[in-house]
Structure formats: structure tokens, C-alpha cells
Amino acid sequence: MVHRLLLADDEAYTRELYEELLKGEGYDVVAVADGEAAFLEAVKGGFDLILLDIIMPKKDGVTFLKEYKTLKPQKPNGQIVMLSVLGEDAIIKTCLELGAAGFLIKSELTPDQVIKEVQGYLENPPIS
């Protein structure tokens, strides 16, 4: 089974790097540059994992999570993992309270570590 991922990050370099890495691992990746586009994709659903930047134009990650809680996607989605260059405890706590499964601080991870993190989330889905 090929895992389908949604990657939302407004920073072109990071988005393109992660997209290339993930596709290189055999994942089907839909990459978008803002929170509104990510939300529209999440409504369609069918993603095994959503990687969501916090600071994005049109809709930030926290707003996405708040609105996502009331969303009924056309197809179920897997976990949401937040991406950020920030390691602020208050933001991390808020995201986790709003339903994010985890938090990756981009500046602290090598590309290989990002792949390992993604694999970990895909191999250990939440118990519903």
C-alpha cells in the first residue's frame, strides 16, 4: 500500500525538499503552500498523514486545527503532525490540545530524521 501524505508549508525550499524526500521513499505526496489550500485538501480527505506548518498565509496551523475539529472529510484522514521552526511550549501545547498527534521542529531534524519520524507516525496510528 502506498501511503498518501498532505504536506503544507509556505517555505518553498522546505516544501520542495520534503516533497522530494518523501516521494523518494515511495509516498504519494500532495504539497501545498498555504493553510487554506491544505484545508481544502483535508476536506477531500484520504490522507494517511498530514504534515502541517504552523505559520502559513491564508490560514495558520492553529486555525486549521480549530476548524478541522468540526470537519467531516469526504474520506477519513490520518494523524496531523505539526511542522515548525519554533519550539515554543505554549504553541506545542495548544496544537496537541487541538488534536495534533505530534510536533516536528524542522531546524532540529536532518532530512533522514524527518523520514524516520514520518515512518513512525505511519506505522503507529492512533487507537480509535
Image (cartoon, rainbow, N blue to C red):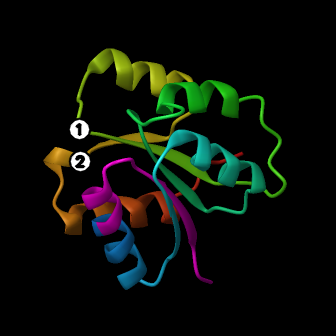
Instruction: Answer yes or no: is residue 115 visible.
Output: no
Q: Is residue 83 above or below residue 113?
A: above
Dot 1 falls on a residue whose secondary structure is loop
Counting from the top left corner in percent of width and height, residue 73 is at 80, 48
Residue type at the position of mark 1: Val
The image quadrant where one finds the N terminus is: bottom right
- The question of residue 117 being in magenta is answered with no
Q: Is residue 84 above or below residue 87?
A: below
Return the residue nearer the eye: 109 or 62. Answer: 62
Q: Residue at x 56, y 25 (%)?
A: 63
Q: Which image quadrant is residue 105 in?
A: top left
Counting from the top left corner in percent of width and height, residue 125 is at 58, 55
Return the residue nearer the eye: 100 or 17. Answer: 17
> Could you give the CA–CA distance between mark 1 and mark 2, rounded to whole angstroms?
5 Å
Residue type at the position of mark 2: Lys
Q: Earlier in the sequence, mark 1 or mark 2?
A: 1
What residue does disc 2 label?
Answer: 106
Return the residue nearer the eye: 11 or 53. Answer: 11
Write the start and end of the magenta stretch as one range: 1-16
Q: Is residue 97 above or below residue 19?
A: above
Instruction: Answer yes or no: is residue 73 visible.
Output: yes
What residue does disc 1 label?
Answer: 85
